[in-house]
Amino acid sequence: MSNISEIQTIEHDVIVIGAGGAGLRAAIECSKQGLNTGLVCKSLLGKAHTVMAEGGMAAALGNVDPRDNWKVHFRDTMRGGKFLNSWRMAELHARHAPDRVRELEQWGAVFDRTEEGKIRQRNFGGHRYPRLAHVGDRTGLELIRSLQDYGIHQGIHVHMECTVLNLLLDGDRIAGAFAYWREKGRFVIFKAKAVIMATGGAGKAWRITSNSWEYTGDGYAMAYDAGAELVHMEFTQFHPTGMIWPPSVRGILVTEGVRGDGGVLLNKDGKRFMFDYIPERFAPETADTEEEGNRWLAGDKDARRPPELLTRDVVARAITREVKEDRGSPHGGAFLDIASRVPEEAIKKQLPSMYHQFKELAEVDITKQPMEVGPTLHYCMGGIAVDADSQQTRVPGLFACGEAAGRMHGANRLGGNSLSDLIVFGWLSGLGAAEYIKSLSSKPEINPSQVEEARSEAVAPLNRESGENPYLLHEELQTIMNDNVNIVRTKEELETAIEQLEELKKKMQTVKADGASQYNPGWHEALSLHSLITSAEMVTRAALMREESRGAHTRIDFEGEREEWEKVEVIVRKGESGMEVIKQDRPAPPKELADIAYATLEELEGTNG
């Protein structure tokens, strides 16, 4: 056994794993509460995936349409999530998002403005009123910039290019984390009384994804291994408009703001097909003629919104159906046309990142030609199960926020709710961690045997003389998920995926990384496989358990929503013999929230109390 004293050790009151919007906001709040705070990120500070969130952050400010209020936002969120959301989390999000957005403005965020000088808000799918505060189509970048600029003055210790591999426990409570520096390959122990998981999702388990390389499900796997429960893992959101052609931009997101600003979806025959896919539940609020949809986009408050702004699951399934019925674009998607509907200068002003990105990377001029788009794995609605008010998991001292946490978005996330989710629940997790630390009667201690076990597992790929190629195993995983756990699922495909994942886990035990630990991307890839495969298995087993189609989870062998499944949620946890998947009853909603969720819009106007 190696000597634990030889491994670099850093001590903080709390460590936040992940430096996206949720992690930065959590770290800021921890520091404000007087905690010695460490922020650990596996890439460079500022490289967070939050910067890819383009369209805006949803908050019922009521700046563009005064009829908007937190109750309408809450209602939209619950309806978008097919009523599987945590009622309390959806309430907290809708109530606090406006204050958190104004706070960002106080910290230096520069939002687009109305003529009256207020924060401008744009239309987005699933939102009844213009609700997304935005900075062109670079809102996520502005969020990160603002939080970083403010956060670096709060005394936060930032540990960059550092990957956390394991949580360390003292009994059943958090004692710290075991990690390594990506550049030098040296290990490091973080001692901490609490850990906040803000690690994002697991999109890199799929081949076509808008997610960047960091999204390997680290937080899900570490929480699972430490004894936390995960919830709603079957709900994986395929954003309807990811670029599918040319190959240089495949999977890259085309913001919903393109449709919010007037873009329409066309099939290969030039037909605007979304009028054929309006669900009965959304019919009263959705235009059934192009003329009415255009009036709504032009600001007519009495008109209904166009069908391109239906929830993401509806639009993604519509594109998939068009392709399967041979009405898709040449490369298996649909055309997104804003060029023929919005003046060139307006596109460049409102969507500068979209214009420059595709012009430079793909030689596609979105002011002159339609984009070829299709569903791309974008977001995990599921995640670590947390208490709504404190964000604490069932593991004492372990908290989670942002995409790493579950229940807030239910079966399907509305566009724009992710950025406001980050700042609301990042704030709450910081407050929760501070309360937990204040309640401790003794300091947790690091167990040397846990450190040695974690170190031994980490170096194993380097010490093997031969073994599986980590890159090929990752490709094999992506093939399994793309073929069997995609936007449309069946029992047969899911059972096939589980069998294939079991074989892949066996191969992972013999994975080999050539070379030493320094500057070794092959080793990094090998170490990420456990998180990737664990997260993929959670999604697959949860999807097999839920025998209905709801939100982003579509089972063609169990079509339609089933009332009994609205009353339960699927929980994944580590058992003695492996992964356990169970159905758990959901608590009945508070009457006052149920009344809001099922109310008409007219009943909620002007009731922002």
Image: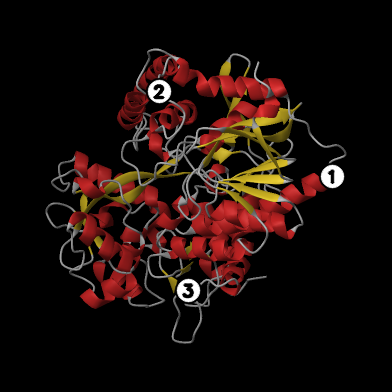
Label 3 to label 1, Cα distance in Å? 39 Å
Q: Quadrant of residue 212?
A: top left
Instruction: State the residue at coordinates (71%, 57%).
Output: 31
Q: Describe residue 339's horizontal placement relative to residue 546 as left or right.
A: left
- Describe the colour scheme in one phrase: secondary structure
Q: Quadrant of residue 331?
A: top left
Q: Earlier in the sequence, mark 3 or mark 2?
A: 3
Query: Is 481 drawn above or below residue 89 in the view shown?
Result: above
In the rendered view of the protein, which quadrant contains the C terminus? bottom right
Residue 515 placed where, x, y %? 40, 24
Q: Earlier in the sequence, mark 3 or mark 1?
A: 3
The residue tagged with tag 1: helix, strand or loop? helix
Instruction: State the residue at coordinates (22%, 48%).
Output: 248
Instruction: Check disc 2 and give the amino acid type.
Output: Ala
Residue 143 placed where, x, y %? 50, 63
Q: Which residue is mark 3?
A: 111
The residue tagged with tag 3: helix, strand or loop? loop
Identify which residue, 505 or 264, lies in the foreground: 505
Characterize the local packing of mark 3: few (<14), some (14-19) or many (20 or more) Cα atoms within 10 angstroms: many
Q: Which residue is mark 2?
A: 513
Q: Describe residue 490's horizontal placement relative to residue 18 as left or right.
A: left
Q: Decide: marks 3, 2 in contact (CB < 8 A)?
A: no
The residue tagged with tag 2: helix, strand or loop? loop
Instruction: Check disc 3 and give the amino acid type.
Output: Phe
Image label count: 3
Label 1 to label 2, Cα distance in Å? 44 Å
Identify which residue, 66 or 352, lies in the foreground: 352
Q: Decide: marks 3, 1 in contact (CB < 8 A)?
A: no
Q: Which residue is mark 1?
A: 439
The residue furthest bottom is 116
Instruction: Check disc 1 and give the amino acid type.
Output: Ser
